[in-house]
Image (cartoon, rainbow, N blue to C red):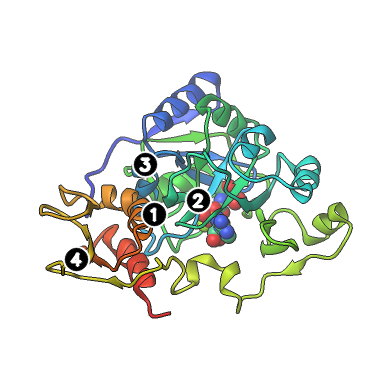
Amino acid sequence: MTQSPIKTEALDAAPAGIARAAELLQAGALVAFPTETVYGLGADARNGTAVAGIYATKGRPAFNPLIAHVADVASARALVEWNDMAEAMAAAHWPGPLTLVLPLRSGHGVSPLVTAGLDTLAVRVPAKACARALLAAVGGPVAAPSANPSGRISPTTAAHVEAGLGGSIAAILDDGPCTVGVESTILGLAGDVPVLLRPGGLSAEEIEATLGHAIAERDSSDPLTAPGQLLSHYAPKASVRLNATRFEPGELSLGFGAGQCDLNLSATGDLREAAANLFGHLHALDARARPIAVAPIPEQGLGVAINDRLRRAAAPR
Ligand code: TXA
Ligand code: MG
């Protein structure tokens, strides 16, 4: 799926540039913006098609869950189930290079493509004033991985972003170099004990000082702490059959392209629309507790990530 180049607007961090960046995000476009850690590639986290664009543009071969960026603690609390540890960490380190993983709250409105179908969400309030002004202007969560093509180095200047993604995103908001330069520290607070899921801009010692006790390192052999890597990570209750060219009686059919089916990822065969619908449709079919058969999805562009996720859903367990 090769996209023809688009004109990437160069915006500066003055009010007019921030307002334009917010307008583009609200319209479903992709905008790179600075945080204190690295430049992020932002999309409206409630717009599945926009979030699918992140994966398409980065060329990510799989759907890893993304961080939802918000302007303040109150906005985070509207998305996730808050607890005492989250309160302590946010009070001490937000805004800042810290991401908290917490259970999703009902009515959160975030596309399941952001969480890759998990029931937890990674949230962060970045420290850079320009980022928070942008998030306040958008008025909702912005999903953003680092603004680089998959497998390349994370960008810490607007020029890095332009070199990697210029011509494929709507705009780059430039507010100079990032001061932290490494990604945020990710702390899992969804279970009984806090877990350091990724080291980053906030040290483990600083976290331990805030919580008043030692924290566990991520156990790389524990699939639950590495959601993107888990083979049967998103496993519906019933069996899943892939590359189904016809559907059997008793099966629920998940289609792609023209044809009769229970739910269609994209009737027009649009991979970006299919990615946006993937987790929501799987959830909906799963709730009906019958075997699921999935039509073939082309192994190209976003289809690679869609098929990766479908294979995990269909893996024996
Ligand atoms: O500093 C940063 O964190 C930058 C800036 C742009 O904010 N963002 C960033 O995003 O590094 P990304 O997509 O490269 O990293 C997100 C990480 C991934 O390792 C992902 O597995 C983890 O967050 N993650 C996201 N949601 C999660 C969840 N619900 N449970 C566990 N890990 C999660
Ligand atoms: Mg990254």
Give the CA distance from mark 2 to mark 3. 13 Å
Q: Earlier in the sequence, mark 1 or mark 2?
A: 1
Residue at the (26%, 58%) spot, across then down: 301
Label 2's element? loop
Q: Earlier in the sequence, mark 3 or mark 4?
A: 3
Give the CA distance from mark 4 to mark 2. 29 Å
Q: Which residue is mark 2?
A: 145
Indicate if the residue with disc 1 has its beta carbon within 8 Å of ligand 2.
Answer: no
Q: Which mark is residue 50?
A: 3
Q: Which residue is mark 4?
A: 296
Give the CA distance from mark 3 to mark 4. 23 Å
Report x, y in % for residue 310: 33, 67
Question: How crowded is the residue under tag 2: few (<14 C-alpha within 10 Å), some, or many (20+)?
Answer: many
User: In this rendering, does residue 40 appear at all?
Assistant: yes
Between label 3 and label 4, give the one nearer the viewer: 4
* Image quadrant in which you'd find residue 5: top left
Q: Earlier in the sequence, mark 2 or mark 3?
A: 3
* Image quadrant in which you'd find residue 48: top left
User: In this rendering, does residue 198 appear at all?
Assistant: no
Q: Which mark is residue 181?
A: none
Tell me, yes or no, whether the two marked residues, 1 and 2, touch with CB atoms within 8 Å. Answer: yes
Question: Please, which residue is most extreme toward the top here?
Answer: 16
Indicate if the residue with disc 2 has its beta carbon within 8 Å of ligand 1.
Answer: yes
Q: Earlier in the sequence, mark 1 or mark 3?
A: 3
Report x, y in % for residue 51: 40, 45
Position of residue 310 in the picture relative to residue 196 (left or right): left
